[in-house]
Amino acid sequence: MQDKANDFYANLEINLKESIFGQDNQIKKIIRSLKKRELLNKKIPYSLLINGKKNSGKIFFANTLLKNIVSEKNIITIDAKEYMDSHTISKLWQEHASFLNS
């Protein structure tokens, strides 16, 4: 099982570096974080918060990472700018209540 996990993370790092340029240090940090949480051994949801300057490629990075880890049908994207007002936060819970109850 350990060899399978090492191969997975090595391939993931290669795939990310082929798609994302100039972010080798960040890719290594993400891979280290995923290894630490033993992503392959657990059947639980995993969240990752990526922050940075505007137009720095956060969404592209997240999408590329997730497409290498899970199928697209298992990805939920939440755009925080839609929920900036205090009265709109309730929309978030209403929209995603079905997956929380399953």
Image (spheres, grey):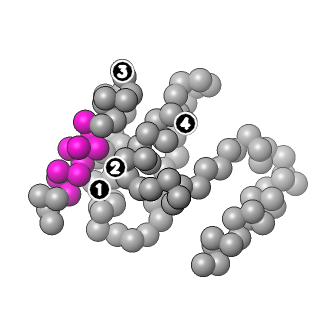
Q: Name which residue lies at 38% across and 28% down.
A: 20
The amino acid type found where label 3 is placed reads Gly
Task: Look at mark 4 in the image and give the residue it sits on.
Answer: 59
- Residue identified by numbered label 3: 22
Spatial separation of the CA atoms under disc 3 and disc 1: 24 Å
Callout 2 secondary element: helix
> Which residue is the site of mark 2?
33
Residue at the far left: name it.
3
The relative height of residue 43 versus residue 51 in the rendered view (above or below) is below
Are the residues tagged 2 and 1 within 8 Å (C-beta)?
yes
Query: How far apart in space, not on screen, are marks 3 and 4 (Cα)?
Result: 16 Å
Q: Is residue 59 above or below residue 86?
A: above
Point out the stretch of residues depicted in magenta.
5-14
The answer to whether marks 2 and 3 mark residues whose Cβ atoms lie closer than 8 Å is no
Instruction: Tell me where residue 10 sits by quadrant.
Output: top left
**What's the amino acid at mark 1?**
Lys
- Residue 84: in magenta span: no
Magenta stretch: dominant secondary structure:
helix
Of marks 3 and 4, which one's residue comes earlier in the chain?
Answer: 3
Q: Residues within 10 Å of mark 2 (few under 14, many from 20)?
A: few
Q: Nearer the viewer, mark 1 or mark 4?
A: 4
Q: Is residue 25 visible?
A: no
Crowding near pointer 4: few (<14 within 10 Å), some, many (20+)?
A: some
Disc ID at residue 52 = none
Q: Residue furthest bottom?
A: 102
Please name the amino acid that badge 2 sits on.
Answer: Ser
Q: Which residue is mark 1?
A: 36
For image coordinates 77% across by 44% down, the residue present is 82
